[in-house]
Amino acid sequence: MAEIDQQLAAAHEALTGGAWIIARDSFRAALDEEESPEALSGLANALWWLGDISEAVAYRERSYAEFRRRGDVVQAALTAVRLCVDYRANFGNFAASGGWLERAARLVDDYGLEPLKGWVLLMRAYDGDDPIQAEQWAGEAREFGRHVGDLDLELCALSQVGASLIDQGRVDEGVALLDEAMAGSLGGEGESPDTVVFTSCHMISSCSHCADFERAVQWVRAADRFSERFGCPFLYTFCRTLYGGVLVATGEWEQAEEELNAAVQMSRSALSGLHGQALAYLAGLRLAQGRIEEAGQLVSGSDDHPAVAPVRAAIHLAEGEPALAATTLLRRLDQIGDHRLESALLSELLGEAEIAQDQADLAADRAQRLADLGADLDCEVMAARGERLLGHAMAAAGDAVKAKSHLESALARFAHLEMRPETARTRKLLAETLRRDQPNVAVAEARSALSVFEDLGAGADADATVGLLRELGVSATRTGPKGTGTLTKREAEVLGLLSQGMSNPEIAERLYISRRTVEHHVARVLSKLNLRNRAEAAAYAVREGVAEIR
């Protein structure tokens, strides 16, 4: 028994230090000797951080059963709380999430586990759909945390209150609390790195909800030290998808590619809703890159998913079918109304479809309502989309002067939001509007837009902008995206390990990432460097002096 206790102690020490591979192997070795709920729970945690979500949940459920058999109701209740989050955030399974929440609540009530009541209240807030009720429950959970000295509970509850306030439209109040929760969790107030994951998920989802991309980017950068030690904090499939969406919106497309591919892989075992959202976000990136056919393939058969509507409509527009785009958009807008953040993109796309059908007057009315709503709600991205659509409608109606004013307003707003792709698209539209009256200004705007499109790898937009510059009498050619042939830091690490003859499983072990993620990185390395196989990659690494990973 003493030897097993020492083995478990070493495994827990590795887990606390973020040495996930060592922790996983140590807990497995302990389980080979004797099955215990502690070893099962520890293995579940290590696997979860390594991205093996399905296996992690299976071990966590086994640990719950063992804790119950032993009569350790405290650990059983805490495990049930964790399973509530797992099923909601990673699988989109609200029935299972609710079931585990009620199991935790019954244990707390039946056995008088007063200190754990706060966690049950927090899960009720997290698992509920009413933001006002969620704010109340999370507030009570925070007080429980303060009363019993549970800083992890206090920080998680604080972030939940902030997220609930933003869901109510009280953005300034909510953002302040989210900032406070992020500062406390990254500052190490809590005992568990899972607290950073929980607060980070609320941060990224809320910033996506209110389009505060600047704040999201700032907190992602502030989490660098945590990420270096423990790994990416956006571990929940839902949050990783949103994180990828923020990266797409801000022009960090290489990293977005990595995160969204990971989200697609992680969500394969989830319910269709979560997987469909990940596919739709990846398809949105493909659209931005001008890879229309690939975008269509990704969402094929998923047209009933809410997140697919803007993707499918954009595909119809790109293929010259504005009437089909309008039908798709109107159906979704009828479902959700036009007063939500999601409706801003839908409304702008619908306006574009109306302009393409010579209905600029309808588009102008729609744009004005969108811009006014954005101003009333203090939602800058909504106002920016409304102003850009209004400018486009004015230009289509022949009023270049008014169009310029609205487009410049949209340009300033998108730039402030650090949405580089939308800023460049607005510059291109401004150049098209000014091509007759102010050709020199049009050339300057088009050149600026082209530089961004080339840098991002937005092929279709870059091609169209080159065509516009040629029409303006400027000799312009495509240079290709600046990232072509270059590797990200992670891809360079993978290449270095390939040069050492490592297999994908060995690379996964060394870099603490999943095997599927390694497969993705290897494919990207071969594609970027125009290499046919791993042997050519290894030879390239030796020839170019790629640094070894030690």
Image (cartoon, rainbow, N blue to C red):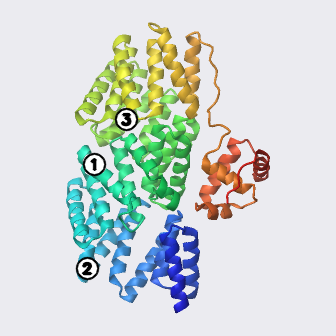
State the residue position of label 1.
Answer: 176
CA separation in Å, label 1 and label 2: 32 Å
Q: Amino acid at mark 1?
A: Ala
Name the N-terminal-most of marks 1 and 2: 2
Please tell me whether residue 136 is drawn above or below residue 13 in the rendered image: above
CA separation in Å, label 3 and label 2: 48 Å
Q: Would you identify the image quadrant in which residue 334 lies? A: top left
Please tell me whether residue 161 is drawn above or below residue 342 in the rendered image: below
Q: Residues within 10 Å of mark 3 (few under 14, many from 20)?
A: many
Q: Residues within 10 Å of mark 1 (few under 14, many from 20)?
A: few
Q: Nearer the viewer, residue 25 or 316?
A: 25
Question: Residue drawn at (36%, 11%), measured in percent from left and top?
Answer: 401
Query: Element type at marker 2?
Result: loop
Question: Residue drawn at (24%, 82%), measured in percent from left and top?
Answer: 110
Query: Element type at marker 1?
Result: helix
Q: Residues within 10 Å of mark 2 (few under 14, many from 20)?
A: some
Q: Would you identify the image quadrant in which residue 341 lies? A: top left
**Position of residue 326 measured from the top left corner of the image (x, y, whole percent):** 39, 31
State the residue position of label 3.
Answer: 346
Please tell me whether residue 168 is drawn above or below residue 22 in the rendered image: above
Q: Which mark is residue 548?
A: none
Question: Residue drawn at (58%, 61%), measured in percent from left and top?
Answer: 514
